[in-house]
Structures are given as C-alpha cells and as structure tokens.
Image (cartoon, rainbow, N blue to C red):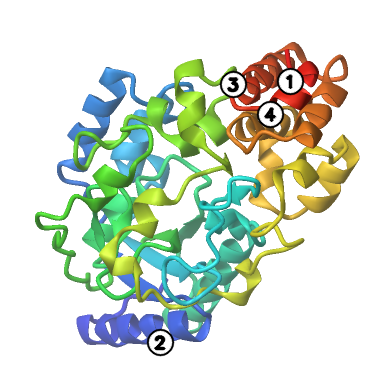
Amino acid sequence: MDSLSLEELGKLKDQIHLWARELGFTGLGISSGGLGEATSALQAWLAKGWHGEMHFMDRHTPKRCQPELLFPGVHRVISVRLNYYPETGGRKGSSLNEPEKAYIARYALGRDYHRLMRRKLQRLAERITTVAGPFRYRAFTDSAPVMEKPLAQAAGLGWIGKNTNLIHPEQGSWFFLGELYTDLPLPTDEASMDHCGSCTRCIEACPTGALDQPYQLDARRCIAYLTIEHKTAIPENLRPLIGNRIFGCDDCQLVCPHNQGAPQGDVAFKPRYELDTTSLLTLFSWTEGEFFQYTAGSAIRRLGYERWLRNLAVALGNSPSESRTLSALDAKLGTVSPMVEEHIIWAKKQLAENIDPEIRSLSV
C-alpha cells in the first residue's frame, strides 16, 4: 500500500461511502475496532451460561474481543449494512396470527445472505484498491469470531437496543451486517447513541421472556435460538410459547417503533416457494429430498431435516385441532428419529386437549 496523506485518506473515505451505496449497501461506517464495554459484557454473558448450546460463542473469545488477534495489523473496521425485509414497513405479510401457517423469520425467506454479502464486500475492496493500491484486508459475514454489532455501533450504523439487535432510527433493524478488517488508517465515523429511551415494547412482546433484562438476551429461552441453534429436544415448558414459529422469531423487531417505516430490502431476499404463506401441514409433508431441494441457497438448510420436523411438530401441536393434523403426525411415527418422535407425541397430546369428541379416537 502506498502511503496516503490525511487529505487523500479523507477523500478515500468519502469515495468508499459512495461505492457502498452503488453496490447496494444501505449503510457504511468506519471504526477503529475498539469494543469498549462490549468485551466485559460478552464475558459476563458467557459466565451466566446464557449462550446455551452455542459453544462456538465461547471459543476464540480473545479473537472476538481483540480484532488484532483475528487480523494482525488491523487499523480500521469498515462495517456495512444491507436491508432484507421483503416489504416496506414492519408488519406486512406476517402469518403469526394464522396458527395453521408456518412463521419463518423474515431474514430466511429468501436467499442466504452470506455469499451475496461477501461478493459485495470483495467488490468494495477491489474499488478501494484502485485508489489506495494493494492493501491488506479480510472480509467477514458472520463467518468468524467478530463482534459485529458493537463494531457497527462504533461505526455509526445504529445502536444496540434493548432487544440486543442493532437499530437505526430510519432503517430500523431489518438488515444484515458485514465487515472489512483493513490496515488502511482511514478517518473514523461517529459512534451511534442509544435511542431506546423508556420504550419496552420488545421486552413485553417476547413470548418466552428471553428479554426480561433489557439489553441482555437469555438465548436459552429465545425462540430463534430454540428453533435454529438448539440441537436437542426443545424444553417442554417452552413449546406452547413457540406458537407457529418454525425458524427464528421476529416479535421483538415487529413491535419496534423504528421498524414501522423501514424500507424494503434487497430483492434477493424476497420470499421463495411462498414460504411466507405456506401451511404447517404442507411443510411437514416434505420428504428429506424435498427439504434439501426447496432450501437450496437458503439459511434454512443449515437446520437439517431432523430439526425441521422437530420444529414443525411443535408448531402443529400449537395449531388448531383437526383430524388431518393428527393423521399427518401419525404418519411420521416410526419413520423419524427418537427426538422428532418425542415431539410428535407431545403435539398429539396437545391437540387431544382441544379436539372434537368425534375425532378423539385418533388422538393418544
């Protein structure tokens, strides 16, 4: 890298912001890589065991807390934001009030963002090279031990709210984050300030009480964790609270006032295969081959077929009692893993409590 003057670095920073917009990013900010109180907050959170089965969170903790250990020689972190919500505003298209339909977190309805973000970050780095010459960098999209939300807050992309999501006053929180660790000594942006104020809507909206302590998430009670990261049986006392959510949960974002006018996201993240309106029974009927066919290029695929069926069994147990639902659950018995079968039996018992007498013979 050729040495650039302070004036040249300032102009380059302005150019980087322009390139980011041209590449489709909805925000870019630059920080020194300092994490402040985020390091001690992470260590306290891990000490409580609130990360549950996410053992990757306590691996490589020093690299999370000290960017220079992950990328020696880092001077700046360029953080980017990419909106994904499929519509304008924060509530449209929600199937949460239709218990016979599946609710999938809005971020997972379209393409998996990892590859798309990495390509955009690579193009951004290539454009920087045209001005700065060869420089050292490394791109991240949730692909390494990076504390992306504290870094993004330090870069002015939003503040970490009471629901632990990064929130921007105009853009809301329906966006993905990515980073370029770089050795360029670019001017930094001003950090964002907290604007949650006295609002507690996200805390009150959480179905399982995972946000009872503001700015802290007990992942062990979080539906997003339970339906995605949790690999074993879902605790029985939490199953009725999951409702029809089969992959993730958006409740704390849906009620956030900053999301009510959030702009529409990138077209790449529009729902595929009508996953935003599909019935639980349709998804439960998928064979393993169909699951992998319809989730190709989707974040849902990492769940695997076993946990897909586990989640759907729970949601069916929370759905209206119908004979066809019981028949679908019965049809899977003896063909699935012991873990899934245990959730199917639970679902049948749940349905039996509310089922019509004339079809009670189908229940356990």
Residue type pointed to by label 2:
Leu
Q: Secondary structure at mark 1?
A: helix
Q: Residue at x 50, y 69 (%)?
A: 92
Tell me, yes or no, whether the two marked residues, 1 and 4, touch with CB atoms within 8 Å.
Answer: yes
Q: Nearer the viewer, mark 1 or mark 2?
A: 1
Q: Secondary structure at mark 4?
A: loop
Cβ atoms under marks 3 and 1 closer than 8 Å: no
- Marks 3 and 4: which is nearer the front? 4
- In this rendering, the answer to whether 289 lies above or below 353 is below
Crowd band around label 1 with a 10 angstrom C-alpha radius: few (<14), some (14–19), many (20+): some
16, 152: nearer the viewer: 152
Q: Does 263 appear above or below 142?
A: below
Counting from the top left corner in percent of width and height, residue 166 is at: 31, 56
Instruction: Tell which of 79 and 102 is nearer to you.
Output: 102
Q: CA distance from mark 2 to mark 4?
A: 62 Å
Q: CA distance from mark 3 to mark 2?
A: 59 Å
Which of the marked residues, 1 or 2, is nearer the chain's N terminus?
2
* Residue highlighted by disc 4: 356
Considering depth in this image, is 241 or 123 the residue closer to the camera? 241
Q: Secondary structure at mark 3?
A: loop
Q: Residues within 10 Å of mark 4 (few under 14, many from 20)?
A: few
* Residue 163 drawn at (x, y percent): 29, 47
Q: Are marks 3 and 4 in contact (CB under 8 Å)?
A: no
Nearest to N terminus: mark 2 or mark 4: 2
